[in-house]
């Protein structure tokens, strides 16, 4: 069940009404309802993977209790080790096994040895496995580090792992943030509900109008890049940058908005990343829940920034490459991670990685020339890296880049998508205006007349219906 | 909570009514449309007291030339509509029979693998129900033919069309569209080449995973029985050469199709015109061109005359 599907807009109100009308007085019933709804939501993809999800939930639930009850540090470590190995084992088998085995075979063959009979697995990747595995891991590690006490209520813990808005593509939640919300009684709040609905509408707009329309041109260019001029390739790459941003942040907005309807606040995942003035700022604003997960559970255990410069550089490369690898079993993702680490390197060496902590041009209508060119430069770097992320393999990515370095860079792009370009420009303007808040509809709350507010919503709804591109699955579902 | 529910209901009610209204004006340009399917539907009422009414999909409108029947003084009309299958046949025939002063002596119904394909009767790509004289709503069609999965997309298309009609319908000119089609026949002189194969074959790949629709097959059986017995109209089934079409279907589909065709041919007269013709008689992977249509139609005339004798 996709967030941008008709069935989701039947499913969501039904769960909502049951939640606030039928089970309004009982917190535990509300949790049970959300859990059943979440399992139903997940089983709409493939019911077989529900068993894997339940097993992973049971494993982490039990491991955390055993870690907490263990008398010795060795016992604690053993339970932690067991949980991590099994969790990552599943992830490894489903997501990385075929990649490792084919890469190994290629490596062996390159050395001149014969390697026949690859044992490849003919399996599909369970939706959301990377996300719920990381939920579980953060919970077990936090329990081990005594940041939280293990949750005894299995329904509450299962809901933490499986809550349908975040189940298949995040945000990657922390037990310290979400579990307390699930345990307390949640009361209906009119303002929060309206805010949730507004954020869902904005997310849908981003996904259906911007991302799906950009996808048409980006797919056309990436699938036949040999036949296009350099300017077309650049435009295709730029459109992919907007596609992936609006696709994923649109999904996150719908997730956050949906959760807010049930009185639950999820972690913010995006904060206007394309207005970043350097790569460090970009990574503080892009897929925040994943970046902070890696920071807390990998970067800091490796020593973080409290090590010598040489070690800090190695740690940075590890984080970015692992982050790339988290996205998928392909050398393209590894290279994308590596490239971002290279971008980050000068900032780290010169101590500039925490230079831009505030949103750009605070209290100003337009950016200064300096800010503008920094934003443009950062966006160009990010877009260049997205080429490697989007390409099916590294040789195609390099070939794509080679085709860009061409005299046709100054020509008008072929099959120029005027309407999509206008939509993207409008989107940038709306994002710029609303960059101090969470979503642009927060601005409409200041409008006194209900009719005008509603008219704005109707215009967006009509735009979604009229200008939506061909329905595409959310990109991050594959991760 | 009550305030919220009331406001949301009002908000969505207004939105729903507005969108429904837009979806209802998607066909206000039907008299001005140049689409050959719509022109064909619109013109059908002008052809009354027919000897033969041909009904079929795009193979029919590109493969049967009614003018050839003029030479033997047969009044015919080709009601071929893109992707038509049993559901389209029902909608088209019901309206035609309700409109005509005198019902046709025979209805010749085209049967091909695509007739029973799950991809046939594509209300999304060809929303003919909106362009009939007495048009049907999207909701009725979704309910009647259980097209619930497609309903949202069909509705969305209607809303888009309705919205664009607001701005464009006044700009369209009423031209003499009858010249576009010759009694429903859609002429093409294009000749099938390897370039056409290369550029179009990807469109046919989904057929590999296509399933033979038993539901549609049974629907057609029931409908034909009704036509034949209750309305007392002679039903003749026929097929046409479809070049490489069958190569794109899986063997399971083809065996089910042959089985179904066998059942139909036992119940009704079946004229097979499906013979292997060279590529020069086709415009693409599966449609006859003008030369091919001449051969197929002349063959049909010959068979009809021989049976008459």
Image (cartoon, grey):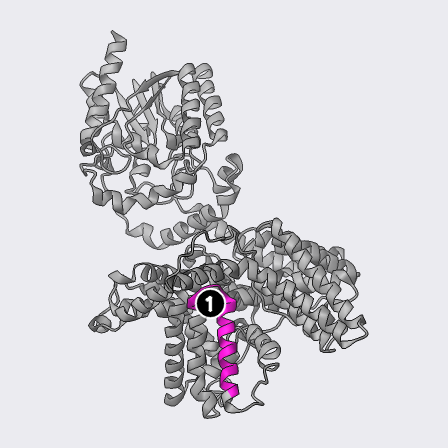
Q: Is residue A371 above or below residue B212?
A: below
At which x and y percent is residue B85? 40, 31
Q: Is residue B134 above or below residue A387?
A: above
State how many labels appear: 1
Work out whether residue A77 or residue A90 is closer to the camera in this orientation and state it.
A77
Work out whether residue A41 or residue A126 is closer to the camera in this orientation and state it.
A126
Q: Is residue B161 above or below residue B89?
A: below
At which x and y percent is residue A49? 61, 52
Work out whether residue A124 or residue A192 is closer to the camera in this orientation and state it.
A124
Question: Is residue A328 shown in magenta?
Answer: yes
Residue in view at x 54 percent, y 68 percent: A453
Q: Quadrant of residue A82?
A: bottom right
At which x and y percent is residue A308? 54, 91
In this figure, which residue is indicated by the disc labeled 1?
Answer: A246
The segment highlighted magenta reads: A311-333
At which x and y percent is residue A422? 35, 68
Question: Is residue A167 shown in magenta?
Answer: no
Residue neighbourhood size for the residue with mark 1, other residues' Cα within 10 Å, grouped as few (<14), some (14–19), many (≥20): many
The answer to whether A398 appears left or right of A5 in the picture is: left
The answer to whether A199 appears left or right of B271 in the picture is: right
Give the residue at the far front of this rendering.
Answer: A113
Question: Would you say residue B125 is visible in this rendering?
Answer: yes
């Amino acid at each position: 069940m996709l967030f941008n599907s008709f069935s989701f807009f039947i499913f969501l109100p039904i769960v909502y009404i049951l939640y606030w009308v039928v089970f309004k007085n009982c917190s535990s019933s509300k949790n049970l309802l959300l859990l059943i709804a979440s399992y139903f939501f997940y089983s709409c993809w493939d019911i077989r993977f529900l068993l894997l999800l339940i097993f992973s939930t049971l494993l982490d639930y039990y491991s955390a209790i055993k870690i907490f009850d263990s008398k010795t540090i060795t016992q604690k470590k053993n339970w932690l080790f067991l949980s991590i190995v099994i969790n990552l084992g599943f992830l490894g088998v489903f997501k990385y096994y075929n990649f490792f085995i084919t890469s190994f075979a290629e490596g062996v063959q390159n050395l001149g040895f014969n390697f026949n009979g690859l044992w490849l697995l003919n399996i599909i990747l369970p939706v959301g496995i990377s996300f719920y595995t990381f939920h579980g891991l953060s919970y077990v590690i936090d329990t081990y580090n005594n940041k939280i006490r293990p949750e005894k209520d299995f329904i509450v813990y299962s809901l933490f792992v499986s809550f349908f808005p975040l189940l298949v593509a995040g945000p990657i939640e922390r037990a310290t943030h979400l579990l307390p919300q699930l345990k307390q009684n949640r009361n209906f709040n009119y303002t929060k509900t309206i805010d949730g609905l507004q954020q869902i509408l904005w997310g849908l707009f981003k996904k259906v109008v911007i991302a799906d329309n950009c996808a048409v041109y980006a797919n056309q260019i990436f699938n036949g890049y040999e036949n296009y001029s350099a300017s077309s390739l650049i435009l295709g790459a730029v459109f992919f940058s907007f596609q992936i941003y609006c696709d994923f942040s649109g999904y996150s907005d719908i997730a956050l908005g949906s959760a807010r309807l049930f009185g639950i606040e999820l972690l913010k995942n995006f904060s206007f990343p394309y207005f970043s003035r350097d790569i460090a700022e970009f990574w503080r604003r892009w897929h925040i829940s994943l970046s902070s997960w890696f920071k807390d559970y990998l970067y800091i255990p490796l020593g973080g920034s409290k090590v010598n410069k040489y070690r800090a550089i190695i740690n940075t490369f590890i984080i970015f490459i692992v982050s790339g690898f988290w996205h998928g079993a392909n050398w393209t993702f590894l290279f994308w991670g590596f490239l971002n680490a290279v971008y980050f390197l000068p900032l780290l060496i010169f101590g500039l990685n925490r230079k831009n902590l505030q949103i750009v041009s605070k209290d100003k209508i337009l950016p200064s020339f300096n800010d503008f060119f920094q934003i443009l430069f950062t966006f160009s770097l990010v877009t260049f890296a997205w080429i490697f992320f989007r390409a099916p393999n590294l040789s195609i990515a390099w070939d794509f880049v080679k085709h860009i370095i061409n005299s046709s860079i100054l020509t008008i792009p072929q099959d120029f998508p005027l309407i999509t370009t206008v939509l993207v420009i409008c989107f940038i303007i709306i994002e710029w205006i609303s960059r101090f808040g969470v979503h642009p509809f927060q601005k409409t709350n200041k409008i006194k007349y209900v009719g005008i507010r509603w008219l704005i919503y109707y215009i967006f709804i009509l735009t979604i219906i009229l200008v939506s591109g061909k329905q595409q699955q959310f990109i991050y579902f594959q991760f | 909570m009550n305030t919220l529910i009331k406001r949301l209901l009002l908000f969505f009610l207004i939105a729903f009514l507005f969108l429904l209204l837009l979806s209802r004006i998607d066909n206000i340009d039907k008299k001005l449309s140049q689409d050959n399917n719509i022109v064909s539907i619109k013109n059908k009422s002008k052809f009354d007291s027919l000897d033969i009414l041909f009904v079929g999909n795009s193979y029919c409108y590109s493969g049967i030339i009614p003018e050839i029947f003029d030479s033997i003084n047969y009044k015919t009309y080709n009601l071929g509509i893109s992707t038509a299958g049993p559901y389209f046949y029902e909608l088209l025939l019901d309206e035609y029979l309700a409109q005509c002063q005198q019902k046709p002596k025979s209805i010749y119904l085209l049967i091909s693998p695509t007739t029973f394909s799950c991809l046939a009767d594509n209300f999304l790509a060809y929303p003919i129900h909106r362009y009939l004289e007495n048009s049907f709503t999207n909701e009725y069609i979704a309910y009647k033919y259980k097209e619930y999965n497609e309903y949202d997309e069909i509705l969305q298309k209607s809303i888009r069309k309705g919205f664009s009609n607001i701005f464009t319908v006044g700009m369209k000119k009423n031209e003499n569209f009858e010249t576009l089609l010759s009694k429903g026949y859609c002429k093409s002189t294009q000749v099938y080449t390897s370039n056409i194969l290369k550029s179009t074959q990807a469109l046919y790949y989904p057929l590999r995973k296509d399933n033979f629709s038993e539901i549609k097959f049974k629907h057609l059986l029931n409908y034909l029985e009704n036509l034949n017995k209750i309305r007392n109209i002679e039903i003749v089934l026929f097929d046409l050469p479809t070049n490489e079409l069958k190569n794109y279907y899986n063997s399971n589909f083809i065996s089910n199709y042959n089985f179904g065709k066998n059942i139909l041919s036992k119940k009704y007269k079946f004229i097979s015109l499906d013979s292997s013709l060279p590529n020069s008689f086709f415009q693409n992977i599966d449609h006859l061109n003008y030369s091919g249509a001449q051969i197929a139609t002349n063959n049909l005339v010959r068979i009809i005359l021989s049976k008459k004798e």
